[in-house]
Amino acid sequence: MQPGNDVEIGDHVQMRKGHPCGSDEWTVIRTGADVKIKCHGCGRIVMLDRFEFLKRRKKVIRRLDQDELLLLRAKE
Ligand SMILES: [Zn+2]
């Protein structure tokens, strides 16, 4: 699966450019007009506007399935 223009909370993504800490993998923790992502390497949170995020995203490594999404939302 390679989504083009969509982004879901919980997405495990790879970005085109690595973070200075050495990791290029992130988890999406908020979606909307702005997208918040958390670095897997150092835990830093970065906010990008949706357009910028989609431009910099290389691929979606894994997307949560429906059950996992429900669990995640129940915790919020
Ligand atoms: Zn990092």
Image (cartoon, rainbow, N blue to C red):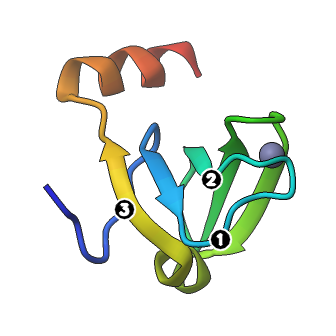
Q: Which amino acid does label 2 sit on?
A: Asp
State the residue lying farthest toward the front: 22
Give the distance between the C-alpha atoms of the residues marked 2 and 3, in whole angstroms.
Answer: 11 Å
Q: Residue at x 62, y 53 (%)?
A: 24
Q: Mark 2 points at which residue?
A: 24
Badge 2, how many Cα within 10 Å: few under 14, some, many 20+? some
Place residue 18 in its image quadrant.
bottom right
Q: Which residue is drawn at 86% across and 57% down?
A: 20
Tag 2 near tag 1, CB within 8 Å: yes
Q: Earlier in the sequence, mark 2 or mark 3?
A: 2
Tell me the quadrant of the picture where the N terminus can be found.
bottom left
Instruction: Please state if 44 lies on the left or on the right of 28 as rendered.
Output: right
Which label is found at residue 17? Answer: 1
Residue 53 position in % (x across, y down): 57, 74
**The residue tagged with tag 2: helix, strand or loop?**
loop
Q: Is mark 1 within 8 Å of ligand 1?
A: no
Q: Which amino acid does label 3 sit on?
A: Lys
Place residue 4 in its image quadrant.
bottom left
Tag 2 near tag 3, CB within 8 Å: no
